[in-house]
């Protein structure tokens, strides 16, 4: 999260510098003879920047930050970055060409009279050249650029790359680290931890509607389709924190489907995984909270090592909610809705339908506040 503030500041610094330049230009303009005569010209040069610079901070903010494709942090993203610039360059060149022709039609003198045959030849030249040859050449040029990038993002069979499964739900992310034979998967939610400096194969699917997996600074995006697995290979150059966001409209809370991505050195990543295999248990104490959790929550949520006999068997067991085994160690709640801090889980349990309307966890109006606070206080302790 640190990176956001710094990059945001960089964007704001850039905007300030530009506004500074604009102010200098304005001052020079005002110094021109005749400009300051009252009632003649109104030049808007106060301490505030002119209205037409208002879009600049927004534009410059796109050059940095944890969600910017223009700040590539991995090989796939870097290749996509160059495709992006190439496409922009071609689009600008084509636009300039079209505008130039357009102006030319206004300015040219009346052409000398042509025979129908000449007319036909000129027309054919434009249709064949501009309508067929130019698009075909552009598409081939783009393919030459894009095909190796696409190939680089394909998981090649069995070359030992790390494999991580990401399963999209309305509206949260389940992340699974498959264990070796006989080992349990490490399961977490809304937080993706990956090794840096090596390719990682992401296996993607969805349980309900189509979502899309997108880590802008590392590359992507890739649809997540119910009943089907798709794959993408991404690599982070070095350790860092990256933003990720569902990139396919998937319902009312699509915007609240953020994924916190952390790339760690290989050793730190192994240690992170080892801490969670087997999952951290439910801990000592908090007897009332555990009983209430068994009664109200355990039909959908799991906590590693939680006593099965505490689960109320009358509850329906067909909805899968996030695994909460390491919830205390996650940076956010509700897939990016609240920062994880003391009291946040209890607050979420009381207000989640206001904070994220329509999410599949029912409102807890029938449970008293003390019980929700006790459950929250216990869940906060769940970390390796
Ligand atoms: Cu999931 Cu949009």
Image: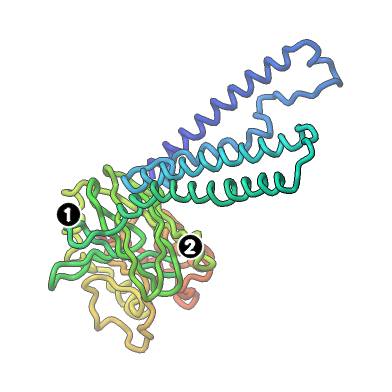
Q: Which residue is mark 2?
A: 248
Answer above or below: position of 361 versus 129: below
Distance of label 1 from label 2 (alpha carbons)? 32 Å
Q: List the single residue furthest toward the left.
A: 181
Q: Along the line of sight, which residue is nearer the eye, 286 or 144? A: 144
333 lies left or right of 51: left
Answer above or below: position of 233 versus 112: below
User: Where is residue 252 drawn, in percent x and y?
Assistant: 54, 67
Q: Along the line of sight, which residue is nearer the eye, 248 or 371? A: 248
Q: Which residue is mark 1?
A: 270
Q: Given this view, does label 1 or label 2 mark the residue nearer the observer?
A: 2
Rendered image quadrant of residue 65: top left
Q: Residues within 10 Å of mark 1 (few under 14, many from 20)?
A: few
First in sequence: mark 1 vs mark 2: 2
Answer above or below: position of 57 versus 170: above
Queried on whether the Cβ of the residue with tag 2 lies below 8 angstroms from ligand 1, the answer reads: yes
Label 2: state its secondary structure.
loop
Rendered-image quadrant of the N terminus? top left
User: Where is residue 135 drawn, in percent x and y?
Assistant: 53, 50
- What residue is drawn where x is 37% and y is 83%? 318
Judge whether residue 340 can be spotted in this image. no
271 lies left or right of 369: left
Q: List the single residue furthest toward the right.
A: 39
User: Where is residue 256 drawn, in percent x and y?
Assistant: 48, 60
- What residue is drawn where x is 66% and y is 35%? 100
Label 1: state its secondary structure.
helix
């Amino acid at each position: 999260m640190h990176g956001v503030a710094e990059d945001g500041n960089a964007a704001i610094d850039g905007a300030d510098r530009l506004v500074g330049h604009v102010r200098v230009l304005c001052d020079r303009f005002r110094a021109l003879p005749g400009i300051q005569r009252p009632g003649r010209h109104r030049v808007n040069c106060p301490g505030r920047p002119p209205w037409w610079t208002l879009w600049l901070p927004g534009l410059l903010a796109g050059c940095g930050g944890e969600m910017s494709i223009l700040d590539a942090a991995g090989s796939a993203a870097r290749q996509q970055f160059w495709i992006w610039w190439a496409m922009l360059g071609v689009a600008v060149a084509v636009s300039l060409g079209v505008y130039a022709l357009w102006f030319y039609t206004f300015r040219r003198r009346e052409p000398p009279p042509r025979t129908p045959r000449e007319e036909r030849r000129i027309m054919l030249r434009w249709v064949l050249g501009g309508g067929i040859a130019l698009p075909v050449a552009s598409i081939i040029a783009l393919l030459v650029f894009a095909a190796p990038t696409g190939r680089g993002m394909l998981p090649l069979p069995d070359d030992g790359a790390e494999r991580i499964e990401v399963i999209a739900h309305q509206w949260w992310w389940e992340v699974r680290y498959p264990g070796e034979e006989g080992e349990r998967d490490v399961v977490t939610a809304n937080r993706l931890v990956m090794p840096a400096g090596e390719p990682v194969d992401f296996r993607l699917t969805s349980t309900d509607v189509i979502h899309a997996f997108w880590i802008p600074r590392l590359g992507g995006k890739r649809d997540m389709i119910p009943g089907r697995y798709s794959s993408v290979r991404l690599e982070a150059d070095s350790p860092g924190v990256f933003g990720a966001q569902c990139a396919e409209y998937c319902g009312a809370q699509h915007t609240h489907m953020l994924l916190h991505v952390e790339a760690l050195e290989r050793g730190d990543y192994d240690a992170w995984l080892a801490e969670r295999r087997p999952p951290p248990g439910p801990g000592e104490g908090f007897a009332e909270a555990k009983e209430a959790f068994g009664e109200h929550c355990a039909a959908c949520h799991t906590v590693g090592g939680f006593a099965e006999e505490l689960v109320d068997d009358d509850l329906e067991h067909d909805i899968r909610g996030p695994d909460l085994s390491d919830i205390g160690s996650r940076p956010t709640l509700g897939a990016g809705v609240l920062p994880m801090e003391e009291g946040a889980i209890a607050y979420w349990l009381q207000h989640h339908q206001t904070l994220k309307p329509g999410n599949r966890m029912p409102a807890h109006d029938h449970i008293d506040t003390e019980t929700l606070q006790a459950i929250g206080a216990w869940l906060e302790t769940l970390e390796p």
